[in-house]
Amino acid sequence: MTKSPLEFYDEELSRTIRQIQEGLLELEWPSPDAKTSQEDHLEKVDKLLTTADMFLQQIATEARAMQQGQEKTQWLEIVKFRRGTLNHLKKDRANVNIFQFPSLEDPASSEAIKN
């Protein structure tokens, strides 16, 4: 059975949202043996947010083009829910601060640690 374009975009959007959530969690609690820098990881999350926006825009366009009825109403509700989720993730992304340990070789950093 083939999927409708809306179902395909919605599945891809769901997958992308999960990747964003995992990426934000990893930024908040970085692994000590992480192979990528936090900046690179942040860039990846930003690209995923852009991709998710495109999927959501496509779903909204397809849903608005549907004939009136129960299915159109359901898809428009899904769009509203997904948009809220995505806006929440964007807010989380905006609050990410990359923590850098003070350098012990830098005298100014050493003074900051002592105080």
Image (cartoon, grey):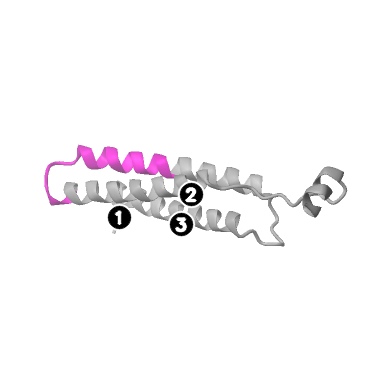
Q: Position of residue 9 (x, y in %)?
A: 35, 48
In primary-sequence order, the first of circles 2 and 1 is 1
Question: Badge 1 is on which residue?
Answer: 2
Instruction: Determine the secondary structure under disc 3.
Output: helix
> Is 18 on the left or on the right of 77, as rendered?
right
Quarter of the image where one finds residue 64: top left
Q: Which residues are magenta?
A: 52-71
In primary-sequence order, the first of circles 3 and 2 is 3
Q: Residue at coordinates 17% horizontally, 51% vertically from top-left?
A: 71
In the rendered image, the residue lying farthest to the front is 115
Query: Disc 1 residue type?
Result: Thr
Q: Residue 57 lies in magenta, yes or no?
A: yes
Classed neighbour count for the residue bearing mark 2: other residues with Cα under 10 Å, few (<14), some (14–19), many (≥20): few
Quadrant that contains the N terminus: bottom left
Question: Badge 2 is on which residue?
Answer: 92
- Residue situated in front as seen by the camera: 33 or 87: 87
Query: Disc 2 residue type?
Result: Asp
Residue contact between numbered discs 2 and 1, judged by CB atoms under 8 Å: no
Q: Residue 18 shows which numbered tag?
A: 3
Q: Does 89 sit above or below residue 66?
A: below
